[in-house]
Image: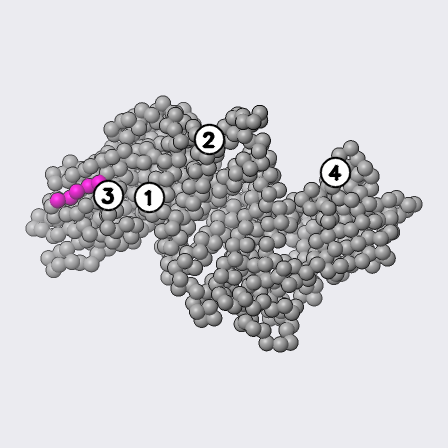
């Protein structure tokens, strides 16, 4: 057993650091630090995706034949950790990490040839059409309907919580193509061009003041049958496969550590009257840091199991659950540390392009919005309650 | 980076699990609880034969040169069986202090004997007024013509009653007065003026308070050459906390397994307890905390030989986190067993009490969150 990296892994670490130093601009760094939502806006995020793509690192999880770098789990760990440390933009995961693996796994040759290069290069920007107003945790109760009409489907219905739908030119969606004996049957996985007539998008503003998610309406939207991935009625299987990617991407501790570091720096600064001098604040920072240590070790244990081809099992639910809870603890701590400055929440966006002087120092601008928006972490991607159901079922057999 | 067990480590785990499953059942534990020695000399001999007492001792002193990870593997199995042998006192604390501070002669005279099972040690350090502050020692060793005169009171000495030799920490006063450093003195248990008052320790095994009223010791009773022993004490206690953390993981895992089984069998309102979502979620939280504790125990073991601040932060982090998880898992195990969980008729209580003892030893969660915070500022 060994926590340290071998010579090869250290060389790779240097390579990643070199790449980041050369490509991460001050503008990208500042914009990322001043983004209180989950993902960077496309101007920042896609600039980074293009840099990664030029290096051949555009899709770390993909097989080499489709343009993946063929990294070992340890290399992925190093890449993610170094990226978090440096504060690189948070590229929207809907393309590379979500729809990409489904197309690779279940798409036709034409779909692979057309979509995959456009995901890698950032030419296409994807959003996810899963949830509906009536289908939250009970996702397979979805009602958006696709009715066959010649070589097309005609889609009617609505999707909600659609991250970056207002930026995206493509959506992957789960739609109902027939009524099956179980509600999971009759669902199909469809790729939709967002410029198709009949699609409208309504912004939803989160409690932190950000426009990241939307509701999307489909009114007789015509989509070619050729845009269906895999078999008709098998969409639930593909969608679940993708959800495992959403939960189990597995390397979150490095980002949490950077988030806590920013809060600790604020606590040590005169801007907060040195909040750290309160023993209570100091002990709480330690408590959260220790939680991150535990999560990191669990991630490394999973990684080690993956390296030797073992299946880590239901632990991805544990990782998702702990990551979301610790993230909330970090942001709650942040809102406490800045004291009275938590009362002044800047409403303008983006925070890195304000044309007036805000009421608080720049270092504090994202603190309260992140705390408020952060309540969503235990809700999206399967609520904490759903994760506990999964742990009980998969790990404990009850 | 690789956290998979090596073949040797896997074998060690299998043999430890097997030994505990075969030799350490409820009857054995009940017998040990009533036994005035608190452990079985036969089992101790078996530990020696299995090589477990030699595990962390350097090869040059007839040991196996293993590390904290191997100790952790063993301790997790010990936790599952609530083993009460004086392993931590002798092998983790005692042998480490001798290895770190002792002269070659002192090591040669003792470490091989620890490895073969013929020498048991204890570490007398805690004092009532010091609480959990390792640097606070009121016991004093005065230089005399023949050697040393030792005076003071120690509490919570793990397995002191069973030890052949007790390692006592004391402020050293030489001819010029207080030296300003802490020394470690080897005190044979049968020495006059050493009064050992032992008691049944919460959660199994024994501990004692020791009164040292002018104990006369020879010159070579002092471990080493007279440099401050505090860094070695901190190291030994950090390693003991890592080892005990692994033991707590074994205890928690057993409690989780037992409680899970019970909730499947126990029927109320016409269905098993586990059919209720509130129960399933509680068990999911328990499973999650056992897993987090396992990660932290392993982390502390892997950092047991790191530079002092990094090692101490990992040890305190593990102690604080595992202590918190232990209370939750222990208390919820009792809760889900209902009234029976509060009785001596089930073993749940015995496992719970060992967890409470774990959280208390060397300072509880609150103490270690603040120690971690202090270390973070000095890092």
Mark 2 highlights which residue? B337
> Chain ID for label 4?
A
Q: Position of residue A10 (x, y in %)?
A: 52, 56
Specify few, some or many for label 3: CA neighbours under 10 Å numbering under 14, 14-19, or 20 or more.
some
Q: Nearer the viewer, residue B151 or A377?
A: A377
Do marks 3 and 4 both belong to one polypeptide chain? no
Q: CA distance from mark 1 to mark 4?
A: 53 Å
User: Residue shown at 32%/39% (left/top)?
Assistant: B88
Task: Pick whichever of labels 1 and 2 is earlier in the sequence.
Answer: 2
Q: Which residues are magenta?
A: B209-213
> Chain ID for label 3?
B
User: Residue shown at 42%/63% (left/top)?
Assistant: A276
Residue B361 got which mark?
A: 1
Q: CA distance from mark 3 to mark 4?
A: 64 Å
Q: Quadrant of the C terminus of chain B?
A: bottom left
Do marks 2 and 4 both belong to one polypeptide chain? no
User: Residue shown at 25%/51% (left/top)?
Assistant: B130
Do marks 2 and 3 both belong to one polypeptide chain? yes
Q: Does A109 sit left or right of A327 as displayed? A: right
Residue depth check, mark 2 versus mark 4: number of the one nearer the observer? 2
> How is colour applied across the structure in the image?
one colour
Q: Secondary structure at mark 2?
A: helix
> Is residue B254 covered in magenta?
no
Q: Position of residue A369 (x, y in %)?
A: 59, 62
Mark 3 highlights which residue? B155
């Amino acid at each position: 057993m060994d926590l340290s990296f071998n010579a090869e892994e250290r060389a790779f670490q240097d390579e990643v650091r070199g790449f980041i130093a050369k490509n991460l601009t001050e503008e990208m760094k500042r914009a990322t630090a001043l983004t209180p939502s989950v993902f960077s806006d496309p101007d920042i995020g896609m600039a980074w995706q293009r840099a990664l793509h030029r290096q051949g690192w555009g899709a770390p999880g993909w097989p080499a034949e489709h343009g993946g770098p063929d990294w070992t789990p340890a290399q992925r760990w190093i890449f993610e950790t170094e990226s978090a440390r440096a504060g690189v933009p948070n590229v929207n995961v809907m393309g590379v990490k979500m729809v990409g693996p489904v197309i690779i796994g279940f798409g036709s040759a034409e779909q692979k040839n057309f979509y995959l290069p456009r995901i890698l290069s950032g030419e296409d920007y994807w959003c996810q059409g899963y949830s509906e107003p009536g289908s939250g945790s009970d996702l397979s109760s979805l009602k958006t309907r696709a009715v066959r009409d010649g070589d097309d489907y005609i889609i009617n219905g609505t999707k909600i919580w659609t991250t970056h739908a207002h930026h995206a030119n493509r959506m992957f969606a789960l739609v109902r193509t027939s009524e099956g004996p179980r509600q999971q049957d009759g669902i199909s996985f469809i790729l939709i061009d967002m410029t198709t007539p009949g699609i409208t998008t309504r912004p939803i503003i989160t409690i932190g003041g950000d426009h990241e998610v939307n509701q999307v309406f489909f009114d007789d939207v015509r989509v070619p049958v050729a845009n269906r991935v895999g078999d008709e009625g098998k969409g639930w299987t593909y969608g679940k496969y993708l959800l495992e990617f959403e939960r189990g991407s597995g390397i979150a501790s490095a980002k949490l550590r950077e988030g806590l570091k920013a809060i600790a720096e604020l606590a040590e600064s005169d801007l907060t009257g040195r909040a750290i001098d309160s023993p209570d604040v100091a002990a709480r920072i330690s408590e959260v840091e220790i939680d991150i240590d535990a999560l990191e070790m669990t991630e490394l244990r999973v990684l080690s199991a993956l390296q030797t081809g073992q299946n880590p099992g239901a632990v991805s639910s544990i990782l998702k659950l702990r990551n979301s809870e610790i993230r909330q603890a970090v942001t709650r701590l942040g809102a406490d540390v800045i004291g009275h400055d938590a009362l002044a929440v800047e409403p303008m966006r983006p925070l890195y392009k304000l044309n007036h002087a805000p009421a608080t120092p720049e270092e504090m601008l994202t603190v309260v919005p992140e705390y408020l928006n952060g309540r969503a972490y235990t809700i999206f991607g399967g609520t904490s309650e759903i994760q506990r159901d999964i742990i009980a079922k998969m790990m404990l057999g009850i | 980076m690789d956290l998979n067990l090596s073949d040797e480590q896997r074998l060690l785990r299998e043999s430890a699990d097997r030994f505990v499953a075969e030799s350490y059942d409820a009857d054995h534990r009940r017998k040990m609880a009533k036994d005035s020695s608190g452990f079985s000399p036969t089992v101790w001999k078996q530990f020696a034969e299995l090589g477990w007492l030699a595990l962390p001792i350097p090869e040059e002193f007839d040991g196996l040169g293993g590390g904290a990870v191997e100790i952790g593997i063993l301790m997790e199995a010990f936790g599952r069986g609530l083993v009460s042998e004086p392993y931590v006192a002798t092998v983790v604390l005692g042998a480490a202090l001798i290895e770190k501070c002792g002269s070659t002669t002192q090591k040669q005279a003792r470490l091989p004997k620890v490895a073969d099972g013929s020498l048991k040690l204890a570490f007398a350090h805690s004092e009532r007024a010091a609480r959990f502050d390792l640097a606070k020692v009121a016991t004093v060793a005065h230089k005399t013509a023949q050697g040393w005169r030792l005076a003071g009171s120690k509490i919570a000495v793990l397995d002191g009653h069973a030890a052949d030799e007790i390692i006592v920490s004391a402020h050293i006063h030489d001819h010029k007065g207080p030296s300003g450093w802490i020394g470690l003195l080897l005190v044979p248990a049968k020495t006059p003026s050493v009064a050992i008052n032992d008691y049944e320790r919460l959660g199994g095994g024994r501990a004692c308070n020791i009164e040292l009223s002018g104990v006369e010791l020879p010159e070579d009773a002092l471990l080493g050459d007279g440099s401050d022993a505090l860094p070695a004490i901190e190291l030994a206690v950090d390693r003991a906390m890592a080892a005990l953390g692994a033991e707590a993981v074994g205890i928690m895992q057993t409690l989780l397994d037992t409680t899970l089984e019970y909730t499947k069998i126990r029927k109320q309102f016409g269905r098993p307890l586990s059919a209720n979502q509130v129960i399933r979620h509680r068990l999911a939280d328990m499973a999650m905390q056992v897993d987090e504790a396992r990660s932290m125990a392993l982390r502390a073991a892997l950092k047991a030989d790191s530079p002092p601040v990094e090692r101490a932060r990992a040890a305190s982090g593990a102690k604080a986190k595992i202590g918190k998880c232990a209370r939750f898992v222990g208390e919820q195990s009792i809760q889900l067993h209902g009234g029976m969980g509060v009785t001596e008729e089930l073993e749940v209580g015995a496992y719970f009490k060992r967890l409470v003892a774990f959280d208390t030893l060397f300072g509880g969660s609150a103490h270690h969150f603040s120690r971690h915070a202090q270390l973070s500022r000095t890092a």
